[in-house]
Image (tube, rainbow, N blue to C red):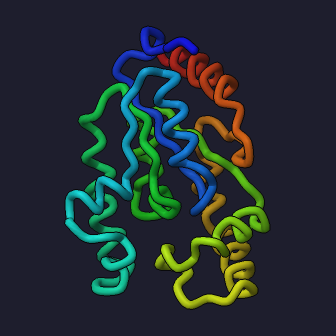
Amino acid sequence: MFAFSCIFVHMKIYLIGYMASGKTRTGRKLARLLDYSFNDTDDLFESKYKITIHDFFDKYGEDLFRQLEQKVLLETRDLDNTVISTGGGTPCFFDNMEFIRDSGISVYLKLPAPALASRLKVVRKKRPLLKGMTAAQVNEFVEVQLKEREEFYSRADIVAEGNCPDIAEVVRRIRELSASSH
């Protein structure tokens, strides 16, 4: 494996997509391939505010979380040569998707609702929005919410199959976009 970092100078790549779409796993692989750093906005949030997202939701609710999440996202403005995995809802609030598109290249890891629901049923205790839901409720929730969020996700520069993303193809598409923007 070899790095492509000389191709991309001072660039940020934002991975967006629904919960459990593989943004963190794919982001780490992509960062290694590009010889970039990797950041996850959920980890940045927890580090900055010294509380897990799950506990934050329980104590303060989603509205305040979304406001502080945006601050964390805006702080990525100063990062260079990094892959940034965002929370599933991050692009869908305020003007976050515009910020993401203006600040770097966005990649949407797309998966169908049944595949996402299947992944989430295993980890729903860790996902604040799914807390206390039955498997059937998770299915319905994911279906409805994914439809609502698709309008934001679909504005990404690149749409990649989330089940087994072809990282080399994503890099090729990033290279094309980077070359056309210079």
Task: List x then y, in percent, for residue 91.
Answer: 48, 56
Residue sitting at x 48%, y 21%: 34
The structure residue drawn at horizontal position 68% and vertical position 73%, both measured from the top left corner, is: 142
On screen, residue 73 versus residue 156, left or right, reads: left
Residue at x 64% of width, y 19% of height:
172
Residue at (51, 39) in percent of width and height: 27
Whether residue 103 sits left or right of residue 143 in the image: it is: left
Q: Is residue 88 above or below residue 15?
A: below
Residue 19 at x, y percent in the picture: 57, 63
156 w.r.t. 42: above or below: above
Left or right, residue 140 beside residue 17: right
Residue 139, how many percent across, how many down?
74, 78
Is residue 172 or residue 27 the one in the foreground? 27
The N terminus, quarter of image: top right
- Please state the total of marks drawn on the protein image: 0
Figure check: 94 above or below 74: below
Which of the 4 image quarters holds residue 140? bottom right
**What is the quadrant of residue 180 in the picture?**
top right
Residue 37 in percent (x, y) is at 36, 31
- Decide which of 175, 151 is in the foreground and name it: 175
The residue lying furthest to the top in this view is: 6
In this rendering, is residue 23 above or below 69? above
